[in-house]
Amino acid sequence: MTVFAVFTASLLFHANASEPDNFIGRWVMAEVVYDDGSINQLESGNFVDINADTITEVIKGYGNRQYPYTRQDNVLTLTADDEQITWQVISEAEHRLEISTPIGKYVLIR
C-alpha cells in the first residue's frame, strides 16, 4: 500500500510539473500600484492577454499593444521594437496575478 501511495504521489508531481503555466489566458487589469504607493483603480474593459509566446495589453485610451516574450522562472522579457522590457511575476494564484512592470505593479484578476 505504501509503494502505491508513493507511486501515485510521484505521478501527480510529474503531471503538475509538466502543466502549462497557470498565468496563460486573459486577465482583467484591476489596478496599477505605482512606486510612490498611489493606486490607479482601472475601469472595466482593460485587460492583459497572455499566450504561450505573446502578451497583449488592451488599455482604454491607449489601444492594443502586443509583445513577444520569453520566460525565465518569474521573469518575463518582452520585446517592444528593439527594446527589452522586464516584467517580474510577484505572485501567481488561480484568480490573481501580480506583475511588477516599469509602469508599476499590475494587479490582474480573472
Image: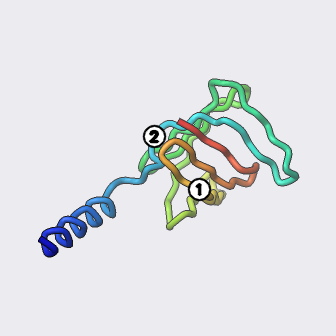
Residue lying at 59% horizontally and 56% vertically, measured from the top left:
91
Quarter of the view holding residue 59: top right
Residue 3 at x, y = what percent? 14, 75
Residue lying at 65% horizontally and 24% vertically, measured from the top left:
44
On screen, residue 16 above or below 52: below
Which mark is on residue 91? Answer: 1
Which mark is on residue 108? Answer: none
> Of 100 and 2, which appears nearest the observer?
2
> Of 53 and 99, which appears nearest the observer?
99
Q: Secondary structure at mark 2?
A: strand
Residue 20 at x, y = what percent? 36, 53
Residue at the spot of label 2: 25
Q: Quadrant of the N terminus?
A: bottom left
Which amino acid, by three-letter code, is at mark 2?
A: Gly
Q: Secondary structure at mark 1?
A: strand
Residue 30 at x, y = what percent? 66, 35
Question: Residue extending furthest bottom?
Answer: 3
Residue lying at 65% horizontally and 57% vertically, measured from the top left:
85
> Of 73 and 53, which appears nearest the observer?
73
Spatial separation of the CA atoms under disc 2 and disc 1:
16 Å
Residue lying at 56% horizontally and 44% vertically, measured from the top left:
96
